[in-house]
Each structure stands twice: as structure tokens, then as C-alpha cells.
Amino acid sequence: MKKFLKWVGIIFALLIGAVILTLTVIYFQTEARFKRVYETPNDVVAIPTDAESIQLGKRIFQYRGCEGCHGEKLEGKVYLDDPAVGKVISTNLTSGLGGAGGGLTDADWIRGIRYGIRPDGTPILFMPSTEFYYLSDEDLGAVIAYIKSMPAVDNVLPPSSVSVMGRVVMTLVPAITFIPSELIPMDAARPSAPEAGITPEYGEYLSLSCKVCHGLTMSGGVIPGFPADWPPAPNITFGGGSALPTWSEQDFIDTIRTGKTPLDKELRAQYMPWGSYKFMSDNELKAVWAYLESLPKLEYGNR
């Protein structure tokens, strides 16, 4: 019996040692990714100062979900604190105490928003630059103009961090990363934005953030890398399991404006950010509808 227990103890110790070694390797591998220095293109974007452009920048900031993350005053906040992922803490973008705004050049703003890269060349955790990478120079310039126009707010926050489980996930599952800049083709020519209009192309441009939850095909399903208590995203193509075939264009617009579906079902704002998308104009929402109508009719879950 003693011999058996001795062997059990040895095996257990070896397993614990293997786990510790694996976690140590994962820690240093992820740290190297967090501290990698990137070379980004030196994009030149005109930053307007007129009131109309600043107002446009505010609206883009709102419907692109930036306000939902950084706050109405751009003061930053704890957006998510989940052991499975880590702490997602949005930066105070103003020039107040704890804010980044006072020390950033226009080039820094462009690099941070479009490529998710800090002034020192390291990546910004959780920053969804995979969406903002596609912003036109005009839209990006307007957003930066709006940010720079905002008054200072004092709000000191700790930086974002990835939990142990989050490090494990992003190491073992190649499709999941909490460093969006890793997914941006910085050496490639950046695609040009489509002309504004009620077209599927412009609708896709406006709805890039929707693909984070609904998938590249927009057919929904379980969202990779999200907390386990998040519900699966619905199918928003016109295929199987989707409610959209029973909706009209006006139903879609009303749903985004009010957060209630034609059947009076309330959209949970913590999962479906209709409160951001409501800032789109009617023509912009019509363009999104045209894009959704143009998608292949897929069955639910074919992300």
C-alpha cells in the first residue's frame, strides 16, 4: 500500500510540475506577444477642426461602439472583468488626470485607432482595430477631431490585462487572440472605403463590428473567446433560423432605434449594442439592411 501511495505521489508531483512548466512557458510566450514592437505604416490623415466634422466624428464614435466602451465623456471604464478572459479596461481618452489625450500626437491617434498600436510600438489589448482598420481617412479624421475636442476628465484606471485562463486560450486556440493588431495586415495595401450610399457595399462597411459576434458570414452561433455566460449570436442572414425574413426594412430600422423587435421582444443591450447603432441615420440603416439582404442565406451557426 505504501509503495502504491508513493507512486501516486510521484505521478501527482510530475503532473503538477508539468502544469507549472506549461503555464510558465505560456506566460513567457504571451508576454513576448504583449511586448512585441510593431512597425506601422505612416498614414497621413487630415484632422478637421470645423464643427460639422466634429459632429460627424461624434456620431461615428457613437455608432461604431466607441462611446459604449469609453463612455459618454470618453472617461474610460472597466468594460469587462471575467476570469476566463481578463480585465478589459477602456482608456480615458481625454487630457485629464489618467487620460491619454494630452500626450498623443495626431500620428499616435491614427496608429492607435487604425492599427491598435501604442506610441512605443506595442499592441493595445482588446482594442478592436480589426474593425477600425477599414475606416476611411475622412471618417477616421472626424473621429480624432471629436476626441480631441472633448473636455478633460480626471479618471485614473489600471491597464487592461489577460487572465491566466485567457493566456492559455490564446496560446492553445490559434483562432482566438486578445491582441487584435496581430490580425491586421500592416504590410498590405489598405482597402479603400466604399462611397456612401444605400448599397450593400456601404452597409458592410458600416456593420463591420457586427461580425465580431455574428461571425464573418453573419449566420451567428457561439462566439469564440467570449465569456461562457454570453448567449450565442443569432443568424442575421435570411437563412434558416433567422427572424429577418419576416421583417421589413422599416421593422429593422425600428428595432435598432428602440431595442424592440416587431414581436415586442426586447434586445438585451449588454449583448446587442443597439444603443450604439441607433445613432446611424435612416439611410445608413437602410444600407445595412441592403447588405444583410445581399448575404447568402445560410443556416444558423455557419460562422
Image (cartoon, rainbow, N blue to C red):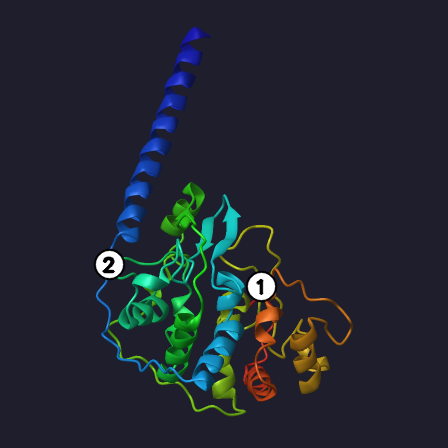
Residue 25 horizontal side relative to residue 221, left or right:
left
Residue 89 location (% of width, % of height): 45, 53
| Mark 2 secondary-structure assignment | loop
Residue that sits furthest to the top in the current view: 2
Q: Amino acid at mark 2?
A: Asp
Q: Which residue is painted at 49% across and 46% down in the image?
A: 84
In the drawing, what numbered circle is on residue 120?
2
Residue 55 horizontal side relative to residue 177, left or right:
right
Residue 270 horizontal side relative to residue 208, left or right:
right
Looking at the rendered image, the disc whose residue lies closer to the viewer, 2 or 1, is 2
**C-alpha span from label 2 to label 1:** 37 Å
Q: Which residue is painted at 35% across and 32% down in the image?
A: 20
Residue 183 location, quadrant: bottom left
Q: Amino acid at mark 1?
A: Gly
Residue 188 horizontal side relative to residue 155, left or right:
left
Disc 1 crowd rating (10 Å Cα; few below 14, some 14-19, many 20+) is: some
269 or 184, which is in the foreground? 269
In the drawing, what numbered circle is on residue 145?
none
- Residue under pointer 1: 221
